[in-house]
Image (cartoon, helix red, strand yellow):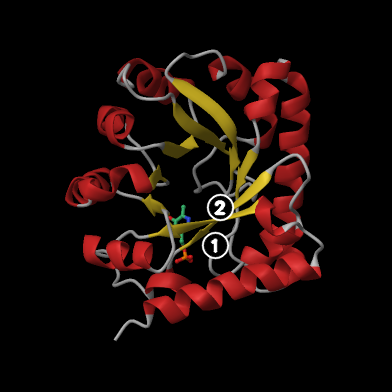
Amino acid sequence: MFPLSENISAVKDRISKACLRFQVPAKKVRLLAVSKTFSADRIRAAHESGLSEFGENYVQEGVDKIRELSDLRSALTWHFIGPLQSNKTREVAEHFDWMHTIDREKIARRLSDQRPKNLKPLCVCVQVNVSLEQTKSGVAPEDAKALVLAISELPGIEVRGLMAIPEPVDDPQKQSEPFQRLVALAKDIKAALTANKAARFDVLSMGMSADLEAAISQTDADFETLVRVGSAIFGSRAPKG
Ligand SMILES: *Cc1c(COP(=O)(O)O)cnc(C)c1O
């Protein structure tokens, strides 16, 4: 049994409580449901319970579900949030609305070139390695501005903000520190963009099931906080093997 609608209510409740507690206007927080490993039917049910933004980590799995749910295409926003190899960029450019894990110029250029002309530019976030772990993907904080500036004029993509997956920690105070650094970095980058580009550099993709309150606590007036929530909505995932 998956009490999907109860889970969704509980997550929305956590979000509203965090907004109240940290004095963040509710409309500054957007909920992205991470549906990796769950079937198209579960996504359809989540949509019926009021969700419209979904995140996928694996290209083929995501494209299969987008095709299966093509009747809902105009009602849904699809986000690619996994690591992406350069030989798989075309599928993302052709099928998704957002891509969160840009960490090099080459991937951004391919996505821009491969974005079909009849679609709006692909919205992208630059992934920043805020915890400075050797193993995690993402650009180093000191290199993020140069990367954003280098890709900001590409016609097939639109740079909408930054994304981070901090190292998991339990202490809420410690959880908020990397998000605070991400916000400071994003404000610095926004100030370096031309007015047109800066106005659309307006999203921070941060916070997951375990740390969404910490992410919301750092919400800045200049950015929406896009929380990426998987297990708290769909239940725990079978290990990928
Ligand atoms: C899987 C995943 C999530 C969701 O994680 P939960 O802990 O299940 O909420 C969020 N962001 C990314 C990038 C993920 O890969």
**Dot label at residue 208:** 1
Callouts 1 and 2 close, C-beta under 8 Å? yes
Mark 2 — residue? Answer: 165
The response on whether ligand 1 sits within 8 Å of label 1 is yes
Can see residue 19?
A: yes
- Residue lying furthest bottom: 1
Spot occupied by residue 223 in the image (x, y as percentages of width and height)? 70, 42
In the image, which is nearer the foreground, mark 1 or mark 2? 1
The amino acid at mark 1 is Met
Residue 235 placement: quadrant: bottom left
Query: Residue 12: x and y, percent?
Result: 57, 70
Q: Where does the C terminus fall, quadrant-wise?
A: bottom left
Circle 1 packing at 10 Å, graded few (<14), some (14-19), many (20+), is many
Q: Which disc number belongs to residue 55?
A: none
Q: SS of the residue at dot 1?
A: loop
Q: Is residue 179 above or below residue 183?
A: below
Q: Amino acid at mark 2?
A: Ile
The answer to whether residue 128 is visible is no
